Amino acid sequence: MAVSKVLVVGGGITGSVLSLALARRGVSVDLVEISPQWFGVGHGITVQGNALKALREVGVLDRVLEKAVPFNHMRLRQADGSLIVELATPHTGGDDLPSTTGALRSDLQDALCDAVYAAGVQVRLGLSVETFEQSPDHVDVVFTDGSTGRYDLVAGADGLKSHMRTLMGIETLPEPVGMSIFRVVADRPAEMDCAEVYYGGPRYKAGYSPISEDKCYAYLLDENLDASLIGPKAPLSLLRERGAGYGGIWGRILEALPEDTTVDYRWIEAVLVDAPWYRGRMILIGDAVHACPPLIAQGAAMCTEDAVVLAELVTGDGPVETALKDFMARRMPRVRTVLENSLQLAEWEIHPETPGADPGRIMQDTLTFLQAEA
Ligand SMILES: Cc1cc2nc3c(=O)[nH]c(=O)nc-3n(C[C@H](O)[C@H](O)[C@H](O)COP(=O)(O)OP(=O)(O)OC[C@H]3O[C@@H](n4cnc5c(N)ncnc54)[C@H](O)[C@@H]3O)c2cc1C
């Protein structure tokens, strides 16, 4: 094997799946997570077929599907709730998996955390990398508590605001794409059986997805409002004001939200770091190097695919450098397509009057493209 001891930095979806994928291949894995408590924050996530396939490969699919809601179609609606079209969604993970599932992020992360501990990964919380020094054969790491470690490979999976990216001297930074999102978890109306999206209203878009038997996740895409609102405490009154004008199930969800509902608000940012994403024996994967507007809901899928492919390649017989080169060749075209199409979609949602704008088509085309092997 090219590597036998790996440090994973960051315990989000990417770092957790990478740790599992490596541990299942016999690699000794240390995972450091900066947060002193390790759990997924609330809100929903759309987990598409290719992400489900990666979760199956690391042995957590069944646990995730115990709570998540699978569906194979979506509906586009007018702002008043009237139906535009129902679309079958391509099975990006193969026909034996649902094309999509809605899940509560914390349910997904809990499943990953439990599996990581069960796989024997050494997890250290409240910790990060302070400095590192590379030689041709290994990386020596000093952690923020002063402890040290020697590894065959260090994988930074520390998200959009990646500290590892800075430590590795990569200057590319995420940029706002010009739209923002309000998100809430709400009671799931009985008639909600799949994700639905409302176009043509006063804002860019509204939508929802079922995420468990009794909960759903609803969102509103808007222009960038006051940045001081960013975080989990945006006023419900503001969401009600901005969301006025959408009817159907979305309007009813908004009306029924209790006053103490947590409303998360954030500007949407995107980043794509140029290849290669590695320097010597240090590599970045997941949102640390590619994050797209969540309009095709492929962010986590790209992250989980990165993790599974990296684990497969670095546990092969060739040298690490060849494995990392092969990784870039496999991942970049796929990730770039998702990012570029998500940005095009964002542009069309912001400027729907653009000649030729066709959000439904680009979404379907992207998912069809992703049916090919990762
Ligand atoms: C509004 C929104 C909605 C989205 N919806 C979807 C969706 O429906 N479907 C989908 O597939 N994708 C979606 N995405 C994208 C998806 O959430 C991300 O692609 C994915 O969660 C990124 O995972 P990650 O592990 O790479 O990064 P993160 O989730 O950011 O995890 C990084 C981890 O690293 C830790 N960390 C940070 N800094 C350090 C450090 N210095 N040292 C150690 N640890 C550190 C963090 O605490 C965190 O645990 C959405 C994104 C947004 C913003």
Image (cartoon, rainbow, N blue to C red):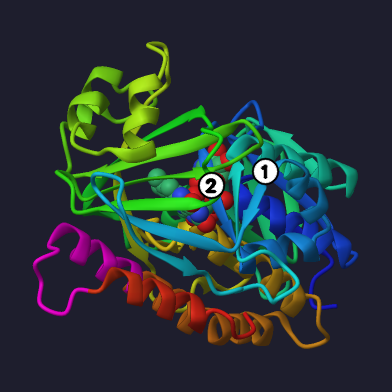
Residue on which the image places disc 2:
45
Q: Which of the labelled discs sits on residue 324, or is there none?
A: none
Q: Which residues are magenta?
A: 341-357
**Does residue 2 lie above or below 188 as drawn?**
below
332 on left or right of 301: left
314 on left or right of 89: right
Name the spot of residue 335 as percent of width and height, x first.
Answer: 47, 74
Residue at position x 51%, y 33% in the image: 189
* Residue 162 in view of the camera: no
- Residue type pointed to by label 1: Leu
**Does residue 88 lie above or below 5 as drawn?**
below
Place residue 113 in its image quadrant: top right
Q: Is mark 2 within 8 Å of ligand 1?
A: yes
| Towards the viewer: 320 or 184 | 184
Residue at position x 73%, y 79% in the image: 313
Circles 1, 2 touching at the beta carbon (< 8 Å): yes
Residue at position x 82%, y 46% in the image: 115
Give the CA separation, mark 1 to mark 2: 9 Å
2 on left or right of 71: right
Quarter the N terminus occupies = bottom right
Q: Assess whether residue 353 is covered by the magenta stretch.
A: yes
- Residue type pointed to by label 2: Ile
Q: Which of the labelled discs sits on residue 108, or is there none?
A: 1
Place residue 347 in its image quadrant: bottom left
